[in-house]
Image: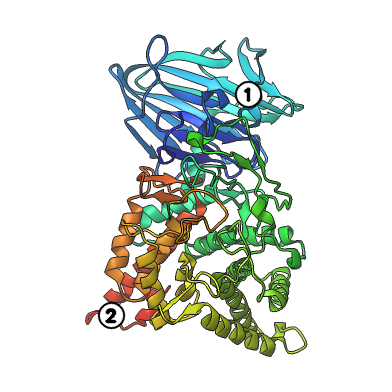
Amino acid sequence: MPARIEDYALIGDMQTAALVGRDGSVDWLCLPRFDSPAVFAGLLGTDEHGFWRLGPGGGTAAPAGPADRRRYRGDSLILEHEWDTDGGTVRVVDFMPPRGTAAPQLIRIVEGVSGTVRMRSALRMRFSYGRVVPWVHRVEQADGGHRTVAVAGPDSVWLDGEAETYGRDLTTYADFTVTAGERIAFALTWQASHLDAPNAPDAEDMLDATADFWHDWADQCTYQGPYREAVIRSLITLKGLTYAPTGGIVAAPTTSLPEDIGGERNWDYRYTWLRDAAITLSSLLRTGYRDEAKAWREWLLRAVAGDPENLQIMYGIAGERELTESSLDWLPGYEGSQPVRTGNGAAGQLQLDVYGEVVEALHLAHMTGLVRNDHAHQLQLRLIDYLEDHWQNPDEGIWEVRGPRRHFVHSKVMAWVAVDRTIKLLEQTPEDEPTGGHLERWRTLRDTIHADVCEKGYDPERNTFTQYYGGRELDASLLLIPQVGFLPADDKRVIGTIEAIQRELSTEDGFVLRYPTHDESGNNVDGLSGHEGAFLACSFWLADDLAMIGRVQEARELFDRLLALRNDVGLLAEEWDPRLKRQVGNFPQAFSHVPLIDTALRLTACGAAYLSAQPDGPATDRVERATV
């Protein structure tokens, strides 16, 4: 059985990523890209579907249990596990060097800390998501040594190590001992099978270069507040989810980790959602990372390819449009959660809120001084032209509901955001206004959308906005209404909506569900069976809103409870199951780490505003600073 989702840690090279369990087992790794077929798919099945376990054991000894300690080395994606055994203490250092155009590598260094420890490496490679057993053989070297290579179709994986290997039961083993001060390295390198063998890496040089890269990148962070540790770890995670060659950002490095253990709510998140990428861009810009913003803007222009009328909600990491959804029937799924999916059928949905997220990101890039790109400017204007004709249409909404299209309130609000930010841009640069009186027409459009939402998306009897026009259900995305500036935080309708969501969508821990998955008769409302956990992004949004309406202490307490849900190395999945008390959904999830950063910035600003308003501090506009 795979470990609990929160028992895994992430390593990656900004082109793909691996998940490593507390027991030293790599149970998930796709090569050479995030969205490539997995070489290790034990996460979604059993050991038969691929893994690489490295830890104390060997001979007649039982395999190692969970490490006694693990941590990232400073501000990096270099992972360290330590085991205390009867013979001594051993450390395993795992990392993937940033590679540019080089071949992807997973490097594992065993370091003796004290005494003498017997170790075992057990490597079972299974290509094509655990379906294909490769041809594994030795290749003799001129110096008398050898390398182990696994080949199947277009793929080959090369194992280099400083310990002798042997094969048994379609698995490659190495049994060895390590003493205090001794270091023994292993490296796994992917290469297209028709190419010459890749060079064996120098593990120690690669470790130094990887540490330098991550520490230099983390040092660019401009945030220095009380939540710096959580913010830096989230930023590093987001950077690790970025596909460096193109600037695309995956929502998560995994597929089909379930939102409902044992159920069907399992999706492939190894793609670039415009919404998720746009809000990730926002967090990176606000913490000092402009190169990533520029790279994502270039990715967006290539992906959209001058055709905003056919804007998709998600693309492949290089801008691919075809993301056909299929099921991998040979995989039993994480803890029996089926189906295991690749591709994503939601790519063809209409989600009008995406236009608002994209325009908001472009607007923020402009406001933070990112060098102007004329193509991006023209794209923004064309997006508004499209919305002008289509904002009144029903859509599938932010949550990709696999049910009927509706007039979702959040979608209309974000359409308003798109128009509003474009108007502000043109007011600052009037020379960019298209001919034909667009600015005045768009001002009217902005007012029309606003009035439409306030009339049709608001329930005056309950003093709350609703999920969709004419409905009574609530939706946690309504918490974004004050954050995007649609209405001020002190508006009674905003306060009423926040309080209604607390009453009707909060769990006993105070975390927030996205929406009711069942109606009053117990029927599913989103086209799917089962339940889901509290959505972590929505819970962070609630903390933001509480701070905005002046309930700062309550916001801090909720934020602290959310931080406590992170695993021991600071990572979050998509959701928290309040019944099972565990993380669920794909992992780690960009859409959870981004609002963590945003809420930390807001609460820090609230504290700064409070201090500066004291008698011995300078006067300040507290509202502006508190709303970041």
31 lies above or below 406: above
SS for tag 1?
Answer: strand
Q: Is residue 221 visible?
A: no
Under mark 1, the amino acid is Trp
Front residue of 200/518: it is 518
Q: Give the mark nearest the N terminus, 1 or 2.
A: 1
Extreme residue toward the front, this view = 521
Nearer-the-camera pick, 593 or 387: 387
Q: Quadrant of the C terminus?
A: bottom left
Question: Which residue type does callout 2 highlight?
Answer: Ala
Q: Is residue 350 left or right of residue 165?
A: right
Q: Give residue 231's position: percent from left, percent from top.
A: 41, 56
Residue named by callout 2: 613
According to the picture, the residue beneath numbered tag 1 turns out to be 158
The Cα atoms of the two marked residues, 1 and 2, are separated by 62 Å
Which residue sits at x=63%, y=65%?
405
- Residue at horizontal 67%, vertical 59%? 349
- Which element carries disc 2, helix, strand or loop? loop
Question: Where does the image place residue 416, in percent across and percent down from the top left?
Answer: 59, 78
Question: Relative to 561, is 414 on the left or the right?
Answer: right
Residue with the most extreme left position: 615
Residue 278: where, in percent of width, then height?
58, 62
Q: Looking at the rendering, which quadrant does residue 36 occupy?
A: top right
Q: Which mark is residue 284?
A: none
Q: Are marks 1 and 2 in contact (CB under 8 Å)?
A: no
Mark 2 crowd level (few <14, some 14–19, many ≥20, 10 Å Cα) = some
Disc 1 crowd rating (10 Å Cα; few below 14, some 14-19, many 20+) is many
- Residue 525 shown left or right of residue 620 in the figure: right
Q: In percent of the image, x 42 and y 9: which residue is there?
A: 59
Note whether residue 566 is visible.
Answer: yes
Above or below, 433 against 243 in this view is: below
